[in-house]
Amino acid sequence: MPTRVYLEIGKTKAFACTVEWPGWCRSGKGEQGALDALVDYAERYRPVVEAAGVRWPTNVTRFEVTERLPGGGATDFGALSKPCLLDARALSAADSRRLAAIVEASWATLDRVAGSASPVLRKGPRGGGRDRDEIVAHVVDAERSYFRKVGIRTGDRSEFIDALRRARNPVPVDAPGKPWPWRYIARRVAWHVLDHAWEIEDKSE
């Protein structure tokens, strides 16, 4: 069975996101560039899934594009920003446990990478870029705003995971404003964590 993928297509970049695998999302120049990047990161993502106790299927890089969404400024900046239509599905108990396990494994990956990295990371050609602790603090700070999208006003990860495991409706019913679907927030949180974990790894080499 092909791996379902949706695309966010901006003016300068596109984002390819797997529907069922939180965190396995990559950007590139155009649709094909994003899909190629997704293939390139498959084996880097695989240990996260295995740490979560989830089976990694064969032929996982055989993709089926299920939806194409117009991107915006966030897409061109390098961040995914939109849920897909398949995120409107209800969740079973097994679905919710699986999403929570992969998010937790993503956090554990960042903890492991940050714990073994130098505090000072390699900078870009113009000297720009954050060091290890700044990246970790940025991830934690971003999660506070993410969690509010499902009605959690603290940055407490355990509270978020408990709510995710209990989720059955596609979208939180008691969250104010325009809440994010549970499948989308799991994807967004895991992607952001892993993107920065891999950044730390790359800048430590």
Image (cartoon, rainbow, N blue to C red):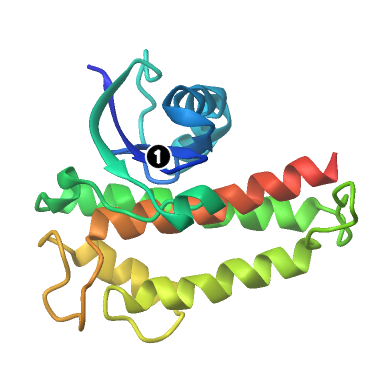
- Percent from the top left, x then y, of residue 12? 52, 40
Q: Is residue 159 left or right of residue 190?
A: left
- Percent from the top left, x then y, of residue 5? 31, 31
- Percent from the top left, x then y, of residue 73? 46, 57
Q: Is residue 194 left or right of residue 120?
A: left
Q: Residue at 39% of width from left, 26% of height from top? A: 56
The residue labelled by disc 1 is 53
Q: How many marks?
A: 1
Is the C terminus in the top left, top right, bottom left or bottom right quadrant? top right
Secondary-structure class at tag 1: loop
Q: Quadrant of residue 81?
A: bottom left
Q: Residue at 16% of width from left, 65% of height from top? A: 171
Residue 112 in view:
yes
- Give the amino acid at mark 1: Gly
- Percent from the top left, x then y, of residue 160? 35, 72
Q: Residue at 23% of width from left, 46% of height from top? A: 84
